[in-house]
Amino acid sequence: MLQKGDKAPYFEGFDENGNRVRLTDFAGKKLVLYFYPKDSTPGCTAEACDLRDNYERFLSLGYEVLGVSRDSASSHQRFIAKYQLPFHLIADTDLTILKAYEAWGEKKMYGKVTEGTLRTTYVIDEQGVIIDAIGKVDTKNHTAQLLSER
């Protein structure tokens, strides 16, 4: 997992509408960049809805929020519409961003070792430096985790 103080890896991908999104688009802003396994699953929905319910608070503190998963753009569109998510989701179908941010790897599910998305969130400052890295995400209380030190 990347650590506090690391330079955030450059990324570019496409959001749910096919718009190109780059790390440099957030220069001068703080960014909550969260990686999650799958649209519309219980934990991922809880996490997205917690961020949604606190989105205005993030904006008022100068943060943008951006989610990344390997789901398709059309899956992201349905997820956003169903839960009225106010932020964009990147469709990282080729795993480029997930791997660059060390959010893809081995994990245990039901006693089996598989490869998949490691639920991870990074907070990146205005200069592109990671100022927080959370590997044990509390999906229902993620905002509290993110803002507890701020």
Image (cartoon, rainbow, N blue to C red):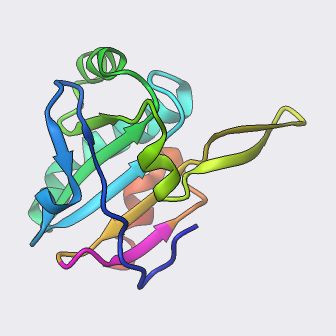
Classify 126 as above or below 102: below
On the picture, is 121 further left or further right than 87?
Answer: right
> Looking at the picture, how far across and down is residue 8, in whole percent?
35, 70
Residue drawn at x 32%, y 23% is 76
> Looking at the picture, how far across and down is residue 123, in whole percent?
34, 67
Q: Quadrant of the N terminus?
A: bottom right
Residue drawn at x 52%, y 71% is 2
Q: Quadrant of the C terminus?
A: bottom left
Residue drawn at x 37%, y 75% is 130
Q: What number of labels is visible? A: 0
On the picture, is 94 further left or further right than 64?
Answer: right
Residue nearest the observer in this picture, 132 or 5: 5
Residue farthest bottom in this picture: 5
Residue nearest the observer in this picture, 16 or 94: 94
Taking the image as drawn, is residue 119 in sight? Answer: yes
User: Is residue 131 inside the magenta stretch?
Assistant: yes
Displayed quadrant of residue 143: bottom left
Taking the image as drawn, is residue 35 in sight? Answer: no
User: Is residue 37 inside the magenta stretch?
Assistant: no
| Extent of the magenta region | 127-133
> Looking at the picture, how far across and down is residue 30, in whole percent?
20, 68
> Looking at the picture, how far across and down is residue 79, in whole percent?
33, 20
Displayed quadrant of residue 48: top left
On the picture, is 116 further left or further right than 57?
Answer: right
On the picture, is 96 further left or further right than 103?
Answer: left
Residue nearest the observer in this picture, 83 or 120: 120
